[in-house]
């Protein structure tokens, strides 16, 4: 059983979490009209033997979405971060379009 | 013969004051508290305990632990049969009823053994050759006979009467194995300040120390260690507990047997499955002695040397009087001395040309005959060994015997450490596999690391316990362990399989695999260990080949002229020993298999004739029995009452999400395919969400409660997914949007009043509220209070009739429900269930789960106009990809049955009238109902857009019932296409 160190709640069993897919792919902006960009985001996945960044949500806990770095060869978890903090760092708060 | 005639009058770890009655194959026998079933059988002179898997050969007790390949029994108690239990690990308790297995008509006289009828069919590769490829049909013929001939115990077929539990546990340091290394590790880790769990499968701690005489220094050491650990507050001693698997995250799967000797525990869980999460693990799992390979080495009366010593010293049973000990190493000599000391006539056949002089001297002192450079070639004796043929420097000779003890060296128990991928590595100096490099949080100690001396194991355990505690940040100084030196000499091992006689020589007793099978596999090219295993079924028994793996490996290595490491080792997988499925299920059986969700009005439904239906985890009213005799009669009656008067429906299961924040309107604009930004306060709107790939995700209504606050409802099925999806987008994609989403599903009870008389009913129920069309128009909102609870009335329709959704604080749900029924009585208000709900929406042409099935787009469902030319919402770009616009894309249509007296069925496949009904057709019927309005069956269907158009006919084929029915393609809206009834 995977055990994930939630930054809010501490070390918890994986059955408290919900898997949310690959976190290494970049989601296009909501108004990006490029079909290729959306195609890549939705369908194209690497399948690494090694570290893999993936989304997990602590559904039976704080409900935060997390970015977990997991080694696909041995399930060792290298890091866990709050997705919101990571994504906020990438796109700093701005006044959203009206 | 008298009872317990093989029992010594003194010694052992049994309580002679506490006799225990048990039954074996119908025979009443007596053992003592502290016995296993195996030791009690041996004490009573029972040597034949079972028949083998394929050849039905007589078998006896081979070991004294969980590695037992032969002595498997069935425990039969009232209403229950539990097969394949090793007698060597069954703690003896009053009333045990054990049966031998795989014999007919009796254990002593077995027909198949005598006839040898199937033996030629059962050699290695037989299954492959006979039943794969062109001759597979032969299986049909042989199966019956083979299933009857080959097999072990028979399980019961009644429900398991026993109870099981599951528990969760945590420790800093888990120590697997309670022998000298494990005990020493536990003391060290506890002294360092760690919380320790010590796991031991036996009902006594001590491991191999239990094979030492009960008045020895070893016994004193064990008593002291045990007392120390028992008094420690940070140590949990888990006896009768097997660690059957190691899983990711240092989670250890444990199964604990209830203490069968404690009458106060009767009725408690028979087994408890515990998931133990440990920060670090010390493996001190010991080693398993290897058999020797010679003809008829499986006869009852052949036993591991260490097992004979355990039966003698732990259970005070002298299993033989005239004993041959066949060995390749020093360790078996300790059994030689103890057996001789107990009065047996012992001969040692040591394969080595010159056994150590000190051992020979001690043997001479005890009158033991020593035959160096000698091995057993063959054995005779049916139900018990009688004579052995020995081969030595002076040629072959015969010797009589009633017990043969064997020791082919030791194999470290590396099963558990292998589970997470630590590969065993061969060490020449000990002639065995030990675990390779451990990750930082796992440690090994004692004989499982090849450290075979007791003194060494204690030191090693102390080191491992200290390191494991230190890994957890606990490093208070621990006192050095008290020493115990049993003076074992190094096990100088000679491993080879010498010549065998003409009879079968077994490498795997449980699976009946012989050296001949290994040779056959080799001849036919199955040389790798993994191939050998599959070709011969080696190691595939319930014992997982604990005693057999090494002999087979060595045998193959010899044939290939290769070294052991070149030949390789097999992969071990959980479980280490068999685990009852009941233990894994625990209490999650029957009604408790999954949780049940009930709405606030559930009690009323149950008390008022509702037939309930499981919808996901929810229980919902299916129909009400007063509406009709069966569901078909009832739902039509309930539909009529909605269309003609009014109906009341429990819709509390809808997902409800509170969406708040300055950017809430922008957020909704992005997640719905249709716009919400311009929705006025106090108005509701139907919305559809897409997935990123352009497929429809869910639908529902969202109401603007205030400028920055919305109330969203989702379908019952997708409630959790929608919330999670909204949170995902806010956390990962749009952290700049100032929006919070919260589930309020359980905070609100919800009910719908639908039908032409619904407004009048609301007026009667809420006289203080203005529910006129002016105050509450279609898609309008009215917020108020009722009995001190929040009240929201939304004018929404799912059925096509004038209708209102009423939300009230959950605790007032049932009260409001009965209040509405009371107020609605003069207007003929009747409750209706989900079948009528579904039928009403089909008649109105609304899509639901069967149409929003994860494959359909907005355009497929005829909802493309909702999005219009909008962009920038989830799924917008990929919904427009060319493949979704293909002319043969299946689109929503209405169907009406045009054959008198026939019906449509959901799932029927659609063909053209002149077509042969074959293959997938052009589409399928998704939802159907009898339409009281139309007077026949109508349905919704998904049909390829290029084969037929409105007005033409199709054939709906339902192969499950061999039904074919003609239907006409029509608009999916069967009723009131102008929507006038919404205002009626
Ligand atoms: Zn959390």
Image (tube, coloured by chain):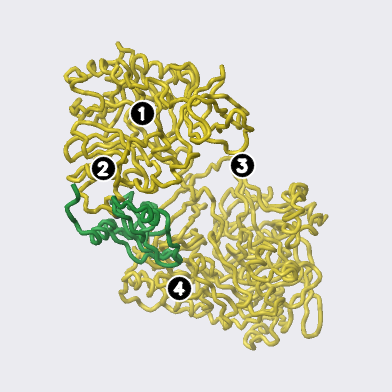
Of labels 2 and 4, earlier in sequence is 4
Find the distance from the CA under tag 1 to the CA under tag 4: 55 Å
Q: Nearer the viewer, residue B437 or B666?
A: B666
Tell me, what hue is chain A? green
Quadrant of the frame with the N terminus of chain B: bottom right
**B766 left or right of B173?**
left
Confirm whether residue B214 shows in the render.
Answer: no
- Residue B669: give its label: 2
* Residue drawn where x is 62% and y is 54% of the image: B84
| Location of residue B831 in the rendering, given as x and y in whole percent from the top left corner | 36, 20
Residue B496 left/right relative to B158: right
The label nearer to you, 1 versus 3, is 1
- Whole-number angstrom distance, CA of label 1 to CA of label 2: 36 Å
**Disc 3 marks which residue?**
B157
Q: Are marks 1 and 3 in contact (CB under 8 Å)?
A: no
User: Could you tell me how far apart the alpha carbons at marks 4 and 3 are, in whole angstroms?
Assistant: 43 Å
Q: Residue furthest right?
A: B115
Specify the subunit that label 4 lies on.
B
Which residue, given by chain and number where applicable, does mark 4 sit on? B438
**Which residue has dot 1 on it?**
B602
**Which quadrant contains ligand 1?**
bottom left
Is residue B852 positioned above or below B646 on the image?
below
The subunit carrying tag 1 is B
């Amino acid at each position: 059983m995977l055990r994930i160190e939630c930054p809010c709640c501490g070390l918890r069993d994986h059955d408290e979490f919900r898997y949310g897919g690959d976190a290494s792919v970049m989601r296009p902006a909501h108004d990006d009209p490029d079909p290729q960009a959306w195609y890549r985001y939705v369908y194209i996945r690497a399948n690494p033997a090694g570290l893999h960044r993936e989304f997990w949500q602590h559904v039976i806990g704080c409900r935060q979405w997390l970015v977990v770095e997991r080694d696909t060869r041995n399930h060792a978890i290298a890091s866990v971060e709050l997705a919101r903090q990571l994504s906020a760092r990438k796109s700093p708060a701005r006044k959203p379009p009206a | 013969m008298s009872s317990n005639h093989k029992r010594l009058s003194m010694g052992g770890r049994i309580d002679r004051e506490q006799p225990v009655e048990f039954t074996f194959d119908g025979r009443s026998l007596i053992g003592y508290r502290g016995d296993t079933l195996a030791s009690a059988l041996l004490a009573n002179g029972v040597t034949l305990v079972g028949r083998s898997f394929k050849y039905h050969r007589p078998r006896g007790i081979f070991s004294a632990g969980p590695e037992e390949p032969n002595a498997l029994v069935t425990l039969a108690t009232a209403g229950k049969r539990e097969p394949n239990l090793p007698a060597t690990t069954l703690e003896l308790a009053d009333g045990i009823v054990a049966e031998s297995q795989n014999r007919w008509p009796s254990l002593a006289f077995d027909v198949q053994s005598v006839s040898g009828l199937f033996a030629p069919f059962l050699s290695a590769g037989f299954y492959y050759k006979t039943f794969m490829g062109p001759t597979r049909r032969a299986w049909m013929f042989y199966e019956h006979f083979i299933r009857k001939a080959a097999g072990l115990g028979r399980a019961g077929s009644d429900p398991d009467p026993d109870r099981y539990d599951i528990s969760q546990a945590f420790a800093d340091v888990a120590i697997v194995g309670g022998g000298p290394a494990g005990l020493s590790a536990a003391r060290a880790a506890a002294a360092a300040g760690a919380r320790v769990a010590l796991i031991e499968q036996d009902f006594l701690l001590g491991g191999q120390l239990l094979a030492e005489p009960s008045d020895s220094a070893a016994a004193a050491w064990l008593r002291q260690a045990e007392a120390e650990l028992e008094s420690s507050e940070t140590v949990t001693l888990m006896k009768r507990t097997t660690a059957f698997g190691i899983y990711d995250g240092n989670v250890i799967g444990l199964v604990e047997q209830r203490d069968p000797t404690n009458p106060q525990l009767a009725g408690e869980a028979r087994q408890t499955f515990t998931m133990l999460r440990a920060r670090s693990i010390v493996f001190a799992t010991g080693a398993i002695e290897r058999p020797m390979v010679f003809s008829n080495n499986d006869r009852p009366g052949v036993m591991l040397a260490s097992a004979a010593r355990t039966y003698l010293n732990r259970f005070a049973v002298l299993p033989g009087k005239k004993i041959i000990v066949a060995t390749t190493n020093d360790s078996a000599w300790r059994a030689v001395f103890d057996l001789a000391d107990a009065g047996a006539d012992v001969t040692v056949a040591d394969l080595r040309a010159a056994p150590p002089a000190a051992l020979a001297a001690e043997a001479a002192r005890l009158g033991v005959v020593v035959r160096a450079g000698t091995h057993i070639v063959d054995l005779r004796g049916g139900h018990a060994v009688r004579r052995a043929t020995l081969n030595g420097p002076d040629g072959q000779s015969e010797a009589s015997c009633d017990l043969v003890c064997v020791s082919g060296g030791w194999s470290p128990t590396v099963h558990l450490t292998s589970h997470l991928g630590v590969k065993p590595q061969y060490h020449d100096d000990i002639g065995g596999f030990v675990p390779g490099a451990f990750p930082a949080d796992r440690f090994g100690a004692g004989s499982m690391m090849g450290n075979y001396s007791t003194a060494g194991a204690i030191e090693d355990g102390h080191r491992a316990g200290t390191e494991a505690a230190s890994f957890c940040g606990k490093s208070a100084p621990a006192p050095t362990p008290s020493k115990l030196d049993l003076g074992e000499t190094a096990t100088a091992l000679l491993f080879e399989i010498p010549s065998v006689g003409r009879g079968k020589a077994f490498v795997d007793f449980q699976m009946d695999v012989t050296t001949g099978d290994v040779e056959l596999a080799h001849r036919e090219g199955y040389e790798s260990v993994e191939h050998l295993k599959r070709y011969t079924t080696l190691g595939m028994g319930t014992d997982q080949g604990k005693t057999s793996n090494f002999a087979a490996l060595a045998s193959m290595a010899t044939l290939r002229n290769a070294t052991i490491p070149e030949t390789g080792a097999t992969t071990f997988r959980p479980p280490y020993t068999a685990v009852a499925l009941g233990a894994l299920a625990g209490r999650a059986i029957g009604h408790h298999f999954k949780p049940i969700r009930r709405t606030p009005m559930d009690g009323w439904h149950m008390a008022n004739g509702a037939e309930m239906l499981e919808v996901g985890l929810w229980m919902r009213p299916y129909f009400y029995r007063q509406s009709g005799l069966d569901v078909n009669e009832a739902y039509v009656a309930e539909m009529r009452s909605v269309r003609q008067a009014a109906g009341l429906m429990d819709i509390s299961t809808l997902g409800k999400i509170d969406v708040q924040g300055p950017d809430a309107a922008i957020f909704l604009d992005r997640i719905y395919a249709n716009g919400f930004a311009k929705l006025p306060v106090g108005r509701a709107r139907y919305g559809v969400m897409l997935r990123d790939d352009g497929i429809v995700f869910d639908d529902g209504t969202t109401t603007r409660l205030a400028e920055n606050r919305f109330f969203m409802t989702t379908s019952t099925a997708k409630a959790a997914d929608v919330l999670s999806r909204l949170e995902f987008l806010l956390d990962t994609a749009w952290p700049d949007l100032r929006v919070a989403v919260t589930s309020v599903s359980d905070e609100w009870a919800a009910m719908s009043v639908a039908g032409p008389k619904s407004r009048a009913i609301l007026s009667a129920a809420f006289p203080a509220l203005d529910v006129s069309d002016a105050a509450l128009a279609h898609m309008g909102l009215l917020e108020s209070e009722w009995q001190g609870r929040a009240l929201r009335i939304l004018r929404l329709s799912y059925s096509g009739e004038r209708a209102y959704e009423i939300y009230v604080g959950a605790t007032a749900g049932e009260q409001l429900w009965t209040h509405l029924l009371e107020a609605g009585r003069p207007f003929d208000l009747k409750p209706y269930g989900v079948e009528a709900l579904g039928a009403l929406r089909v008649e109105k042409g609304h899509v639901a789960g069967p149409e929003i099935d994860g494959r359909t787009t907005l355009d497929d469902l005829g909802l493309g106009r909702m999005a219009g030319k909008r962009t920038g919402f989830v799924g917008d770009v990929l919904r427009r990809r060319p493949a979704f616009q293909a002319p043969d894309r299946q689109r929503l249509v209405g169907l009406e049955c045009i054959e008198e007296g026939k019906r449509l069925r959901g799932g029927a496949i659609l063909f053209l009238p002149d077509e042969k009904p074959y293959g997938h057709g052009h589409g399928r019927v998704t939802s159907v109902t009898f339409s009281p309005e139309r007077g026949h069956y109508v349905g919704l269907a998904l049909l390829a857009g290029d084969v037929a158009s409105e007005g033409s006919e199709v054939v709906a084929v339902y192969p499950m019932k061999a039904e074919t029915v003609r239907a006409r393609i029509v608009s999916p809206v069967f009723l009131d296409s102008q929507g006038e009834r919404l205002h009626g």
